[in-house]
Image: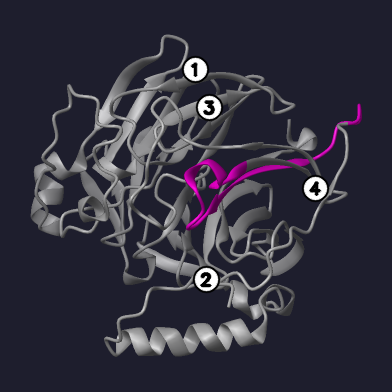
Amino acid sequence: MSRGWVLTEKYKTKPLSGKTQMQVLFTTVVRGAPVEQGGELIQLDWDSKTVINKHPIMPTNPSIHDPNPRGNSRGGRGIEIIGDQIVVASYHTLKFFDRRLSPLRDFSHPLMVGLHEIYAHPEGGTKIWVTSTSIDAALQFDLHREKLTDQYWPREMPVFQQALGITPLEIDKTADNRLEFLESKHFRGPSHLHLNAVTCWQGDVYALFPAFGVVANLSKESIALQAQRIKRAHNLMILPDGIAIINDTYGRTIRFYDLNTKKLVKAINLRSFPEITQLVHWQYKAYFAIRESLRKMSFPLSPLPRPFFVRGMDLVGNRLFVGIAPATIVCLDWEQNKLLDLFSYSNNLEAVVHGIKVIDPDSG
């Protein structure tokens, strides 16, 4: 039985026209695939739901032999736009493309280890924050000078150590660490934060610690929010009024928290939309539920891909774009709790969306 059930891709391709159009850039990770086939960057014309271009994303220079059969070093992660260039994170490298997905250059650093989400300030400039998830670091680089300009190591901060009961990571920060943290033992320890998202709000740098269900203010060394529902979460976006939008990955729900009150103000359960639940055959849902029940009873079974596993986020006005498994982009009116549209790229449940960036000509 195929773990993905159906392995055919569902999309059309077309050349890039001269017309300005809304585009959705997204990356995929294919769990269990050979590293060189572990994911892509896709450029999608959203209105016509056609793929304009795509490019494989894999770690090179150095290349990787990955002992972890899950996502780990495979595929693409966060996406940002800086000037006319598209910046995509792979496991240890930022890859630069032009607007037609032609490769331009790569930039890596000895502390880029297990990159996940990246953040470029919307006001512009050449600096970018990256989450070096495997080593629990938030790092800022000046891409023009290719220099590390700022860094946070929350496991070394006394406030977080005391509040979360964590200890510093043993790491030589002067060494090349890019291939040193591939094995799962490095991110399953009791002190691992799995820091996988970073953003800025009111001049401060914030990060997500999914292992503890925490949104942390790194600048002020404080816990802005802690909630059980955001353990194992992905993505962090903070609106000007302090509403934090977070993907509850395993709950298949998007959660909205007010950082001023530390309260949940809204939750959108993606499984409440029939158009989404129909993407996965009922037989797989039943098979998954039975396997998970047996695993919880300590039967020695490997985990299966979770249907509607949610990861990836971008916001354009009231339209919230998120990614799910199998690799699908969902567009919601988050204010009205309405499903507006979706695009299914693949039926393979091993293929998941990781990063999303929307290029909207109408938003400037």
Query: What's the CA distance linking mark 1 and mark 4?
Result: 28 Å
Query: What's the CA distance linking mark 3 and mark 1?
Result: 15 Å
Residue that mark 1 sits on: 126
Where residue 245 sits in the image (x, y, percent)?
Answer: 49, 56
* Range of residues picked out in magenta: 17-40
Residue that mark 4 sits on: 46
Give the mark, 3 or 1, whose residue is nearer the N terminus: 3
Please give the name of the residue rendered at 83% of the width and 51% of the height, measured from the top-left corner: 49
Please give the name of the residue rendered at 88% of the width and 49% of the height, measured from the top-left corner: 48
**Element type where label 3 sits in the image:** strand
Q: Which mark is residue 95?
A: 3
Question: Looking at the rendering, in which quadrant would you find the C terminus?
Answer: top right
Q: Amino acid at mark 4?
A: Trp
Q: How many marks?
A: 4
Q: Amino acid at mark 1?
A: Thr
Residue 20 among magenta residues: yes
Residue 30 among magenta residues: yes
**Element type where label 2 sits in the image:** loop
Give residue 291's quadrant in the image.
Answer: bottom left
Mark 1 vs mark 2, foreground winner is 2
Query: What's the CA distance linking mark 2 and mark 3?
Result: 29 Å
Question: Looking at the rendering, in which quadrant would you find the N terminus?
Answer: bottom right
Lateral position of residue 312 relative to residue 193, left or right: right
